[in-house]
Image (tube, grey):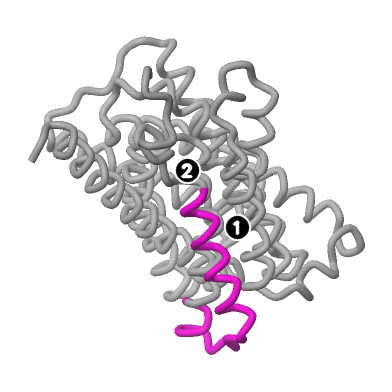
Amino acid sequence: MSTQAQQATSGQTTLSAEIGLLLLLSLIWGGSFTLIKVTIPSIPPCTMVAARVTIAAIVLLVIASAQGHLLPRERSIWAALLVQGLLQSAAPFTLISWGEMHIASGLAGVLNATPPMFVLAIAMTAGRGRQAVTGRKIIGVGLGLAGVAATIGFDALSGIGTTAPLAQAAVLGASLCYALAPIWGQRFSKLPAIVTAAGAMSCAAVLMLPAAVILEQPWTLTPTTQAIAAVLGLAIVCTALAMVIYFRLIRTLGPLGTTSGSYLRAGFAVALGTAWLGERFTPSALTGMALILAGVVAITMPVPARQRDPEQ
């Protein structure tokens, strides 16, 4: 086998592995919606998010230490990690949890599937980022959003602009945070993913713990056993494990490829709701999932070698 053929095979294997990780991340984050539904009746949003990110930070710090990694000492890096923790966890987790208290989960799912659109819009207005925007990626974003709407149900769109506009704005604000987070997170490419995840979650905990204490007095709550178990699942699986995968994917698939998982996340949320909560699975959901997969493939697949400039 020639060197070029070996490199092509290796590249395809690597891409397959990264897409597999994107699927896993989407499955994990899709499951978080189910866990939030279990948690929110007895644990309010700020307290739930504070517990989630604090437990995740502890787990990540222990793993990073066990692997022999040292946390950065530069103040500039910690300032950047504070912004990352705000964009990736503290702000969107709280906004989504509060928003879903006031609007239907289906509408929230559609609104929360918009990060790739924000990333594409940001890329189109940036000088260097504009070069990465292709017709195929634009089509992929459109297919993915249509797939989410079909999966959750087009009737979920009927509430847009009429029901609880502030809650809708909150969920869209969370999507904007999710779009900005991977773009900002590219600056941590020289740090191990576990270190970036541990630092960002530690900063998110620093932001959320005072908010929970001041706004919700968590010591007065009486959460159910199921809610406590759900918070542990959110913290360990949906946050600690997910963040390690997430910061790896930012380096390998880039911001748009990584945020395309929001389409898959919506599909998995519907599938898990059908399996575990007894929710109805419709033929349009199957069509929607097919559109989602087509959109993700269009966004993440590289340009074939035969279409590239041979001089590059």
Above or below for 245 versus 252: below
* Dot 1 or dot 2, earlier in sequence: 1
Q: Is residue 115 left or right of residue 235?
A: right
Q: Secondary structure at mark 1?
A: helix
Quick one: label 1, few (<14), some, or many (20+) residues within 10 Å? many
Q: Where residue 312 appears, x then y in whole percent?
A: 37, 19
- 1 and 2 marks in contact (CB < 8 Å): no
Residue 209 visible here: no
Q: Is residue 41 above or below residue 44?
A: below
Q: Amino acid at mark 2?
A: Gly
Q: Picture quarter containing residue 208?
A: top right
Q: Position of residue 192 (x, y in %)?
A: 26, 29
Find residue 257 and name its label: 2
Looking at the image, residue 67 lies above or below residue 291: above
Q: Furthest-right residue in view? A: 162
Residue drawn at x 40%, y 56% is 238
Residue assigned mark 1: 144
Residue 242 x/y as whole percent: 37, 50
Q: Which residues are magenta?
A: 272-298
Q: Say which amino acid is labelled 1.
A: Gly
Task: Give the left or right position of residue 60, taking residue 37 as reference.
Answer: left
Residue visible at 48% across and 69% down?
268
Tell me what residue is drawn at x 38 percent, y 37 percent: 306
Q: Is residue 75 or residue 296 the one in the foreground?
A: 296
Q: Is residue 287 above or below residue 204?
A: below
**Marking on residue 29:** none
How many numbered marks does the figure carry?
2
Q: Give yes or no for residue 277 being in the magenta stretch.
A: yes
